[in-house]
Image (cartoon, rainbow, N blue to C red):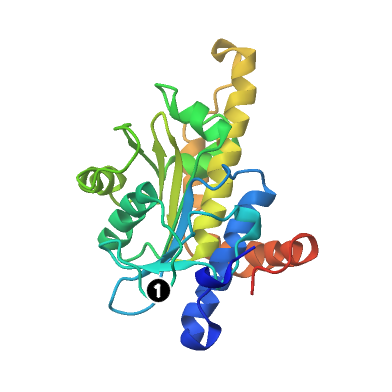
Amino acid sequence: MATAQMITPREQISDAEWALRVDLAAAYRLVAMFGWDDLIFTHLSARVPGPEHHFLINPYSHMFEEMTASALVKIDLNGNKVGDSLAPVNQAGFVIHSAIHAAREDATAVLHLHTPHGQAVSAMAFGLLPHTQTAMIAQHDVAYHDFEGIATDLEERERLVADLGTKNAMILRNHGTLTVGESIPQAFIRMYFLERACEAQILMLSAGRDNLNNPEQGVAEKVKDQSTGPGMRMLSDLLAWPALLRKLDRVNPGYRD
């Protein structure tokens, strides 16, 4: 549900930005559909095409399952709203997302979650283990950032960016998970693999770490080679994402409003 004061009229938005808004609103609803949301907390963002480096983020009042394209708030890299929206924006969301959008030209989309499985792995000293196929797909691209408290300190942005480097996923220690992508579908599929890997790790550790089957040497490197490059971009953008939108249209339509 979006109140009138929070909605940006369609006629004020370019076709390119509107398409981005639709995909981002869909990503919010998909996060809710997968059970990855955290009430109104956590945040997904997407950079608007153009030289201004404006980006879209959730109004800090909406449940993810009710997000719409028009309700998303556009802000600049200083946290100023662009347009007439009166909706509040989460300060921690601004700090994390503005840091990455400003530093990484390829980071069109940034997704950040607080799932129980992601938080559990983020609290483990050894991080993500390469003991499942899904973990091997994700692990080679995962960076780590130490917890500094709720991310409202602008000075943390420099350390976030330095720790992420050229990776496309991050485990925020004692906090949660984060992914970036050249498109919203790519960031979402990366998050899917990362979250599934974290969930599997929590389940497999119930057997005790001494009872785990260790993959043969070189297998993780082989999976890395198999799961990077144009093939994964096609999987995200042209195969998985359209299928996810069809599912969303069946179970929770309205995100295009």
In the displayed structure, 209 sits above or below 141; it is above
Q: From where the camera sits, is residue 234 visible? A: no
Quadrant position of residue 143: top left
**Horizontal and vertical percent position of residue 14:** 47, 86
Nearer the observer, 25 or 73? 73
Residue 172 placement (x, y as % from top left) = 39, 37
Please indicate whether residue 174 sits to the left or right of residue 77 in the image: right
Q: Which residue is mark 1?
A: 48
Q: Position of residue 115 (x, y in %)?
A: 56, 37
Say which residue appears at 36% left-offset and 47% top-offset.
92
Residue 149 vs residue 203: left or right? Answer: left
Task: Describe residue 147's horizontal placement relative to residue 158 as left or right.
Answer: right
Mark 1, Cα crowd under 10 Å, few <14 / some 14-19 / many 20+, is many
Left or right side of 63 for 148: left
**Circle 1 — which element?**
loop
Q: At x 38% / y 31%, what residue is drawn?
A: 173
Counting from the top left corner in percent of width and height, residue 69 is at 57, 71
From this view, report whether residue 249 is shown above or below residue 30.
below
Q: Residue placed at 27% from the left, 64% from the top?
A: 77
Query: 44 or 62, which lies in front?
Result: 62
Q: Quadrant of the N terminus?
A: bottom right
Q: Nearer the viewer, residue 104 or 111?
A: 111
Quadrant in which the C terminus appears: bottom right
User: 134 or 11: which is nearer to us?
Assistant: 11
